[in-house]
Amino acid sequence: MKRMILLGGLVAVVGFATWFVMRGPNMAPASSIQVDRSEARVARGKYIYAELAHCEGCHSERDFKKFGGPLVAGMDGSGIVFPKELGLPGRIAPPNISQDPELGLGRWTDGEIIRAIREGVSRDGRALFPMMPYQNYANMSDEDVESLVAYLRSMPAVKHDVPPTKVDFPVNLFMKSAPRPVAGRVSAPDRADRLAYGKYLVSMASCENCHTKKERGEPVEGMNYAGGEPFRIPGFEAFSANISPDVETGIGGWSEEKFLDKFRGYRNFTDENLPVAVQANFTVMPWLGLRNLPDDDLKAIFAYLKTVKPVRNKVDVHPPVVSKL
């Protein structure tokens, strides 16, 4: 009898292990929606893509020899492979999202694109690596996600083959639990409610993701918005700033005008006068996109950030010497 119990237990364990390895992500069928591509929709989508959510920053070739890593001409939405110096678990390659039918989104349906953005599931049913902040985008309003799709459809095709993402074991198994189907419609926040709208913008811009230190890919408890997360590419290293409302080490002592001026200060940069990137100014903060946010949106973001928990955490954003990996 004991042997039968042990055998049954072993079969159960093997069965569970097999299911865990072979299972797909939690997913729902893509909708059959066909997005209206009005001029207003495309304009709003461009704002989300290039400025607020900065999709172009992760899905395009960039020139990090210059401040802010401007896009390489003709490579918008072409896809890239993140450098190994970022310390990611494997080869993480944001794909080509141009309208190329073979290498990009040209043959995807609008519903498949929306599912990938908000639910983290690719056209072929794979879970997307959650560095793509689809858990934030699950809250993207229907109007905004449809506008983003409308803009993506307006982009030209770029012939650029990107190798597929290959996530190391065991992260490749655990990440299958990240996608979640979005149930029902998602309404846009009331812009008259500055805090609600600011929270929405902060989520779409993924401010918390970059400004919270992580250990083993998970946010350190109690360190939300307190900065200290490292970002490295060959030759450069920077740490995200503390944007919690701590008076001494964060933005607690900042006025609204100082916050706005921080973004406005980058509006004078052009392709011709961008400074050369050096360790003292290296950044992956998307200043070149965020500088174009309307003042009303920046004010809402500031208002919301002032409500999060202040965390005392002094960060040396630009250490003088790049640490060895």
Image (cartoon, grey):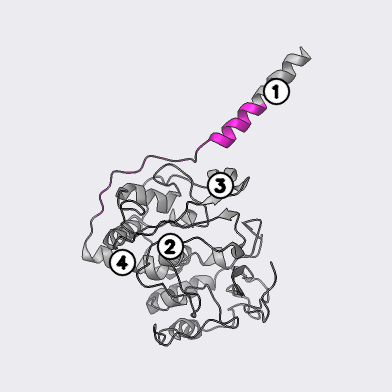
Camera-nearest label, 1 or 4: 1
Report the residue at 40% width, 84% height from top. Answer: 267
Q: Measure how far apart labels 2 and 3 are at the Cα level.
A: 20 Å
Q: Measure how far apart labels 2 and 1 are at the Cα level.
A: 46 Å
Q: Name the residue that disc number 3 marks.
A: 175
Q: Measure how far apart labels 3 and 4 are at the Cα level.
A: 31 Å
- Tell me where residue 214 appears, x and y as whole percent: 64, 61
Pick whichever of labels 3 and 4 is earlier in the sequence.
4
Q: Quick check: marks 1 and 3 in contact, CB under 8 Å?
A: no
- Tell me where residue 38 appears, x and y as whole percent: 21, 62
Report the residue at 49% width, 75% height from top. Answer: 302
- Tell me where residue 107 appears, x and y as whole percent: 30, 49
Pick whichever of labels 1 and 3 is earlier in the sequence.
1
Vertical placement of 10 versus 159: above or below?
A: above
Q: Measure how far apart labels 2 and 4 are at the Cα level.
A: 19 Å
Q: Is residue 121 visible?
A: yes
Pick whichever of labels 1 and 4 is earlier in the sequence.
1
Locate the C terminus by quadrant.
bottom right
Q: Say which of 130 and 280 sits in front.
A: 280
Q: Residues within 10 Å of mark 3 (few under 14, many from 20)?
A: some
Going by the image, does 111 lie left or right of 246? left
Span highlighted in magenta in the image: 13-35
Q: Name the residue that disc number 4 marks.
A: 44
Q: Three-letter amino acid code at disc 1?
A: Gly
Q: Name the residue that disc number 1 marks.
A: 9
Vertical placement of 170 versus 236: above or below?
A: above
Pick whichever of labels 2 and 4 is earlier in the sequence.
4
Q: Name the residue that disc number 2 marks.
A: 59
Q: Say which of 137 and 77 sits in front.
A: 77
